[in-house]
Structures are given as structure tokens and as C-alpha cells.
Image (cartoon, rainbow, N blue to C red):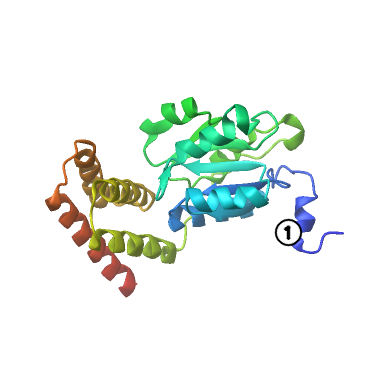
Amino acid sequence: MPETLDDFLMTRPPTAERPLLGQTILVVEDSRFTCEALRMICQRSGARIRRADSLRSAERHLRTYRPGIVLIDVGLPDGSGLDLIRKLSGPTGEAASGPVVLAMSGDDTRADEALAAGAQSFIAKPITSISAFQTAILAELPRTARPTAIRPVSTDEVFPDRIALRDDLSLADDLLSGPMDSETQDYVAMFLFGVARASNDDELEAASQALRAAAAAHDRAPAGVDLLRRLVANRLAAEHTV
């Protein structure tokens, strides 16, 4: 007998209003702001969500649990999400009987390499539309796992708590204030690019993109790092006054 409400809901079939009932989604994502949006969407959709913020955390989770869906960010703090996609989708990943594997990124130019690595689909960030997320997930599920009733089209979007945004900015501030090798520069630029897109911050997005381009050209770009450091500090100060 189910011990909690979550356990009870996991035993129920999907409905038109909650089409992801019965599904557990492992979200492999380093941004708390993005994870909060996904938590809100999954709550509205009926899915149980678990989070891993790195490759190491995801692999530890997968040794213990068997989620039906794994949603993997392409860029993670300890390596590329593409490696985990390959591991879960390749010959040893038993893709036919394993989880549904989807990739996501704030950079939609990464879609082709994510699909080539074995992802069944690619979702561009930011992710705010409940209906669009449900459609992307349902398209990869077997027919028996989908609701039989017609699903109403919703225009609802989610708006994550800004405390999660502050957490992301604090993480970026710590990275920008520490030793800056080429790998850290590339990661923090990519991380902030996604955060900027999710928070509709055009200035931060442009500065992050410029630093990403510099990292790709093996340019340490100290002026670009300094600019990002100032922008992040300004936004943290503004968040603390809200």
C-alpha cells in the first residue's frame, strides 16, 4: 500500500490534466533556477522529480534508482552531459529497455550533437511552458504511458522563485572570484549564458556569449571575466534589495 501521497500518485494512470502521472524524471542540471522551473512544471504535470547537479551525482543516483526519464543538461560542472547521454543511450545503455533520455541546453546550436550522442529529443532552455514540456516528454513515451483522453492545450507558464536565481548568481560569483583556468572560464560563461536566458537578462547574456567565444578561441579574456564579475555582483546586490 502506498505510504505517501507521492507514492499513491505514482500508482495512478496518467490523465488529461496530469499527463505525466506515474513518471519519475531525473533532472541532471546545475542551475537551481532552471530546476525550480522544472519542479513547478512536473508538479503541475503529475511527475515526480529528482535532481542531480553534476555527472558524479547523476551516476550515484542511477546506481540506486531507475527513473523512467532522464533529462540531461549538455554543460555540467564536472564534464559534458553528452558523455552521460552516450552511456545511457549506447549499446551498453540498453536504450530499448532503459530510461527515455532527453538533452537540454540554453544553446540550441548544441541540439545536433546531443541527438548524435543518442538523446531521443532536445529541449531548448529556458523551459517555462507547461504544455510544451509535456508535449516534448509525451512524444518519447510509449503509447501505454500516455493519457487516453484528449489533453487540453494550456498557455500557462511557470515563473521560478528569484531565490533560486540568487543561488545561481552566487555560484557564478564564487567561480569568477576564484582561479580562472580555461575550463572554468568556459564553464562559467556557459552557465551564466543559460541563467541570463532563463531570467531574460540581455546584458548578461551578451557578456556571457562574448566570454564563451573568447574561451572557444583559447583567449583568457581578462577584461571579459572582469565585466561578468561586475555584472554578477550588481545583480546580486539588486536581488538582495528585493
Secondary structure, mark 1, is helix
User: Which of the 4 image quadrants contains residue 5?
Assistant: bottom right
Quarter of the figure that contains the C terminus: bottom left
Left or right, residue 119 beside residue 193: right
- The residue depicted at 35 percent of the width and 50 percent of the height is 191
- Residue 63 x %, y %: 64, 49
Would residue 139 be visible to someone looking at this image?
no
Residue at 55% in and 49% down: 58
Count of picture labels = 1
Residue kind at label 1, given as amino acid type: Asp
Per the image, the residue denoted by label 1 is 6
Report if residue 225 is visible in the image.
yes
Q: Is residue 151 left or right of residue 28?
A: right
Crowdedness near tag 1: few (<14), some (14–19) or many (≥20) residues, C-alpha within 10 Å:
some
Image quadrant where residue 163 sits: bottom left
Residue at image position (25%, 47%) is 208
Give the percent coordinates (x, y) of residue 110. Answer: 39, 32
Quarter of the rendering containing residue 95: top right
